[in-house]
Image: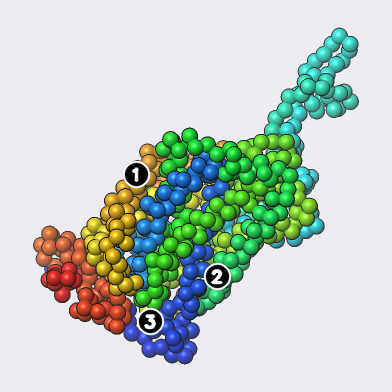
Amino acid sequence: MNKLKCPSFFKCRGKEKVTVSSENFHVGENDENQDRGNWSKKSDYLLSMVGYAVGLGNVWRFPYLTYNNGGGAFLIPYAIMLGLAGLPLFFLECSLGQFASLGPVSVWRILPMFQGVGITMVLISIFVTIYYNVIIAYSLYYLFASFRSELPWATCSPSWADENCSRSPIVILCNVSLTTSEIIQANKSWVDTNNLTCINGSQVYRPGQLPSEQYWNKVALQRSSGLEETGVIVWYLALCLLLAWLIVGAALFKGIKSSGKVVYFTALFPYVVLLILLIRGATLEGAGKGISYYIGSQSNFTKLREAEVWKDAATQIFYSLSVAWGGLVALSSYNKFNNNCYSDAIVVCLTNCLTSVFAGFAIFSILGHMAHISGKEVSQVVKEGFDLAFIAYPEALAQLPGGPFWSILFFFMLLTLGLDSQFASIETITTTIQDLFPKLMKKMRVPITLGCCLVLFLLGLVCVTQAGIYWVNLIDHFSAGWGILIAAILEIIGIIWIYGGNRFIEDIEMMIGAKRWIFWLWWRVCWFAVTPVLLTAIFIWSVVTFRRPTYGTIEYPDWGIAIGWCMILFCIIWIPIVAIMKIIQAKGNIFQRIASCCRSAPNWGPYLEQHRGERYKDMVDPKKEIDHEIPTVSGSGKPE
């Protein structure tokens, strides 16, 4: 019986030579790699990387985590985790993509048995792009709603507000005097109906719902009672989602040649807005109190004794840098071979972390003002995630003079923050398609890119139904969690422990030049031991502390949780499947097959012959598709 043949999707597929013509707008005449193309300028790449790493989480999650974990004290574990976990993984992925000039799936020629890790990364990116563009659609809706003389959530409008809508606590009971000797406690509505007056100090209050909260739930989302009640598609959110995908498609229709220009605006504009909001916020009464809660005198260094604080710091660094999503490998694959990816990693990581800290000042200065005018403590108004972006912050902006102007700025900032992250995620998908089907992608980049956007738009329609926010929360909770951690752990184990950390360092030195041993000391310590141990600890912690997801007080049904687990399983199941199929493809007995798949493919190495040097002089043509055989290994460790 003939040995089973693996579909070409699972093979170490090479690039096919395509003649470059003047009609091929994806490749420039000055590009070093005429098959795939390169970034037009170094700044295009850096801004794309900054835009990918700096996202909504920097604005709506980091400030809350800092406040909740000891204020300024939280920056200590945050900086430590950047050095131990974030930066080592970031540098590793940037180096990997640049060295081979391949995307997150094909780059696993480095270790064929682990190619499923790359597929997992791409699948998770697909799930994330579906719901991430829905958040962009929310921002678009609020942006359009802000073009009014008065923000629609500034007051409790009778057309959508109910009796619970109020910025201040609502009196439900109070004592009234019926006669000089008779005092009773009565319902407030009964008191008002009978034109009586409450005795001072006898009122019983219940919290009211802010106008911005009711507007978010009743108008923007038309939110249903739970995941079980799908309701109808909210047509204006669907149109905003379509517009979001049209913007993404328009920015990417020429690949990195077009997106690399768009990010000059989408990556830089948020900093302008944050600076404007910070200056405005600093002039408001109560701003100092808000910043004090964020990172000032309210800092609590005793929090550093709690393991939860260190876990939050490691998790935030890991997710905010976008490692293990495939995007870093994809974007770096378009670099020229001798680009200094080391300095790039340092610049992007520091920019990302400093942006998070900077954003916190802008957020908390205005939240401090909101707390001041409402007579509450900052702790009572601070929120994270959707509650910050679409309830707390809009509420604060509505109470500022010129509220519509500040609201337009804020939601346009959210829009640009989301878009450049989305650009990189879609580029991850199209880069994977290009690696697998290079000739097709050369001829049909525009229809394929737009086709991807159309399919993802249709898949996202469930997220703009009346139950849409529950789906967004569910996908985020499951797909963007454990799967990424598993991929990251296997990535570093495969490259450093199996392929060989020292060998990988030699690969990097081929690009950036030889370095002294002391230069690599820190990276060796992190790659070989500290980083994988930290990632494993985060993974175990997240499994042990797993809780069923909720949205506010709404719990998810069992079938919803089952769908969440299926999403994770669908993403990670390719890791063992591809490993098994690679072993089946190989020749020899079972041990020889496993050993073969744990060696680099013969076509692994620098994409262009001019960069291969002595170490990769016997490299098989990377454009040639190969099956796995038992190669003999030369003294350099390279299969012959």
Q: What residue did someone put label 3 on?
A: 33
Q: Earlier in the sequence, mark 1 or mark 3?
A: 3
Q: As rendered, which of 124 and 334 lies closer to the eye?
A: 334
Numbered disc 1: secondary structure: helix
**Dot 2 amino acid type:** Val
Q: Is residue 484 above or below residue 629?
A: above
Q: Earlier in the sequence, mark 2 or mark 3?
A: 3
Say few, some or many: other residues with alpha carbon within 10 Å of mark 3 (under 14 / 14 to 19 / 20 or more): some
Q: Assess whether mark 1 and mark 2 are in contact (beta carbons under 8 angstroms).
A: no
User: Which mark is on residue 286?
Assistant: none
> Residues under labels 2 and 3: Cα distance?
22 Å
Q: x, y (%) of residue 175?
A: 80, 19
Quarter of the image for residue 224 reads: top right
Q: What residue did someone put label 2 on?
A: 263
**Dot 1 amino acid type:** Ala
> Residues under labels 1 and 3: Cα distance?
40 Å
Q: Earlier in the sequence, mark 2 or mark 1?
A: 2
Residue beneath the point at 37% across and 52% down: 84
Quarter of the image for residue 430 reads: bottom left
**Dot 3 amino acid type:** Asn
Residue beneath the point at 37% across and 38% down: 544
Say few, some or many: other residues with alpha carbon within 10 Å of mark 1 (under 14 / 14 to 19 / 20 or more): some
Q: Is residue 579 above or below residue 337?
A: above
Q: x, y (%) of residue 81?
A: 41, 49
Q: x, y (%) of residue 368?
A: 67, 43
Numbered disc 2: secondary structure: helix
Q: Is residue 40 above or below residue 329?
A: below
Residue beneath the point at 75% across and 56% down: 404
Q: Assess whether mark 3 and mark 1 are in contact (beta carbons under 8 angstroms).
A: no
Q: What residue did someone put label 1 on?
A: 537
